[in-house]
Image: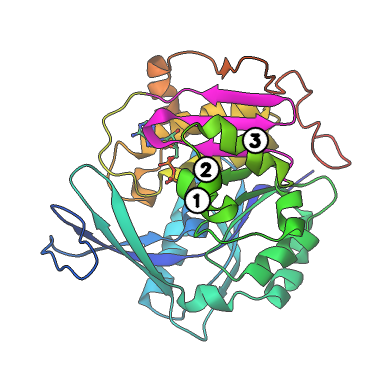
C-alpha cells in the first residue's frame, strides 16, 4: 500500500576528493593526489544506498541547474531512486571537500549551496511523497526548520529516522519523533555536551535516550553499533573487514537500517543488517560507489560473528511484533 519503502529528505553534494598522506592540522597545508569528483551528500548517499539494496526509494532534495546537479540526478536514477522530489535551480549545487588518509579516515568541509534552500514550503508541496512512504529519513545538511517541517508532515503510521549530522543541539519536538536517532560519538558529544559522553557508549546511549527519542542507535565504526530502547541496550557486533575508506559508511548504515525497519525487522535485527552494509561500504573507496547490493551483503554474512549480544539486564525489544512501534498502523 506504500509506493516507497523509504523517503530520504536531505542533501545532495558533489564530493571533491583528494587522497593525502595525513590530514592537515589547523593552519597546515599538505599536498595530495589528483582531484576526483563523485556524487555525495548525506541525503543522496542514503537514497542510493537504500535503492542499491533493493528498497523502493524516493529523494526530496534540491540541486543547482549545473553540471554537478546533473551528475547527482544521473547517479540517483542509475541506482533506481525516484527523483520526482528533486528540485532544480536557483543556486549552485552543494559541494563537499573531502580528504582521505591511507587508513581510510576522512575530514570533510561542506558548502551547502542548494541544500540550504530546501525550505519548509518545499516539504509541504511534497505531501504526496510523505503519504506514500513507509519510513522517512533525514540528516542535518539541510536547514533545521525544514527537518522540523518533515516531522510535522509525516503520514500516520510512518516511521522517522534521524542521523543528526552535522550535529547541533536538537529541539525536544525533533528528538521525540526519532525512532531511532542514529549517532556516532562526535554527534553525541555535540547533542549532550562533551562531559556527558564517557568512555562506555552504553552509558551515554542511555542518557541520549532519556532526552526523548523512542530509540537510539550508536555507530562505533569498526566496533559495530549499539541499540538503546526503553527495554535496554544491545551491542551489535561489527563484521571484520579491511577498511579502505570510511566515507559514507554511516549513510549506508542508516539507509539499510531505515529500510529494514520498514520491512518489519526489529530494531536490533535492522541494526545487525545495517552493520553488515556499513562494513561492506568501507571495503571500497568513495561513498556511493562503495555501497553494496543485497547480494554483496549476503556474501559478507559468512564473516558475521553471530547474533546481536544482549547486555546484562537489558532487553533489545526484539520480541516485539515487527512494526509495533510504528504509529497507529501495522505494516
Ligand atoms: P559514521 O560515519 O556516521 O561515524 P561509522 O564510521 O560508525 O559511522 O560507521 C557506521 C557503521 O558501519 C558502524 O556502526 C559499523 O557497523 C560499520 N563500520 C564502519 N567502519 C567499519 C569498519 N572499519 N569495520 C567494520 N564495520 C565498520
Determine whether 42 is above or below 61 in the image: above
Secondary structure of the residue carrying tag 1 is helix
Location of mark 3 (residue): 206
Q: Is residue 243 above or below residue 22?
A: above
Q: Position of residue 255 (x, y in %)?
A: 54, 44
Above or below residue 203? Residue 182 is below
Q: Quadrant of the N terminus?
A: top right
CA gap, disc 1 and disc 2:
6 Å
Residue extending farthest to the bottom is 90
Q: How many marks?
A: 3
Which quadrant of the figure contains the C terminus?
A: top right
Q: Which residues make up the magenta segment? A: 213-239
The residue positioned 64% from the left and 43% from the top of the image is 208
Alpha-carbon distance for marks 3 and 2?
11 Å
At x 20%, y 71%, the residue is 27
Question: Which is nearer the N-term, disc 3 or disc 2?
Answer: 2
Do labels 1 and 2 touch, CB within 8 Å? yes
Mark 2 within 8 Å of ligand 1, using the beta carbon: no
* Quarter residue 322 falls in: top right
Point 26% across, 30% down: residue: 242
Of mark 1 and mark 3, the one earlier in the sequence is: 1
Where residue 324 appears, x then y in whole percent?
81, 31
Residue occupied by mark 1: 194
Q: Is residue 276 magenta?
A: no
Given residues 303 and 216, the one toward you in this image is: 216
- The alpha-carbon separation of the residues under discs 1 and 3 comes to 15 Å
Q: Nearer the viewer, residue 223 or 245?
A: 223
Amino acid at each position: 500500500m506504500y509506493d516507497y519503502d523509504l523517503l530520504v529528505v536531505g542533501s545532495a553534494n558533489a564530493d571533491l576528493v583528494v587522497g593525502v598522506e595525513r590530514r592537515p592540522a589547523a593552519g597546515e597545508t599538505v599536498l595530495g593526489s589528483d582531484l576526483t569528483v563523485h556524487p555525495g551528500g548525506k541525503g543522496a548517499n542514503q537514497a542510493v544506498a537504500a535503492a542499491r539494496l533493493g528498497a523502493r526509494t524516493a529523494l526530496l532534495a534540491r540541486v543547482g541547474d549545473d553540471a554537478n546537479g546533473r551528475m547527482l540526478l544521473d547517479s540517483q536514477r542509475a541506482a533506481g531512486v525516484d527523483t520526482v522530489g528533486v528540485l532544480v535551480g536557483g543556486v549552485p549545487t552543494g559541494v563537499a571537500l573531502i580528504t582521505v588518509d591511507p587508513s581510510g579516515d576522512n575530514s570533510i568541509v561542506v558548502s551547502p549551496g542548494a541544500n540550504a534552500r530546501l525550505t519548509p514550503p518545499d516539504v509541504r508541496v511534497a505531501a504526496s511523497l510523505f503519504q506514500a512512504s513507509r519510513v522517512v529519513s533525514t540528516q542535518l545538511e539541510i536547514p533545521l526548520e525544514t527537518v522540523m517541517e518533515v516531522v510535522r508532515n509525516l503520514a500516520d503510521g510512518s516511521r522517522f529516522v534521524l542521523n543528526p549530522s552535522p550535529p547541533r543541539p536538537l529541539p525536544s519536538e525533533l528528538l521525540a519523533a526519532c525512532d531511532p536517532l542514529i549517532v556516532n560519538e562526535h554527534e553525541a558529544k555535540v547533542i549532550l555536551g562533551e562531559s556527558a559522553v564517557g568512555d562506555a557508549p552504553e552509558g551515554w546511549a542511555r542518557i541520549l535516550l532519556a532526552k526523548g527519542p523512542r530509540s537510539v542507535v550508536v555507530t562505533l565504526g569498526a566496533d559495530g553499533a549499539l541499540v538503546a530502547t526503553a527495554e535496554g541496550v544491545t551491542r551489535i557486533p561489527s563484521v571484520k573487514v579491511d577498511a579502505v575508506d570510511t566515507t559514507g559508511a554511516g549513510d549506508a548504515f542508516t539507509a539499510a537500517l531505515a529500510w529494514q525497519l520498514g520491512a518489519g525487522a526489529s530494531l536490533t535485527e535492522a541494526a545487525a543488517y545495517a552493520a553488515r552494509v556499513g562494513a561492506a561500504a568501507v571495503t571500497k573507496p568513495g561513498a556511493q560507489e562503495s555501497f553494496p547490493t543485497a547480494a554483496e551483503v549476503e556474501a559478507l554474512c559468512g564473516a558475521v560473528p553471530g547474533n546481536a549480544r544482549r547486555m546484562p539486564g537489558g532487553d533489545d525489544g526484539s520480541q516485539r511484533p515487527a512494526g509495533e512501534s510504528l504509529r497507529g498502523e501495522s505494516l
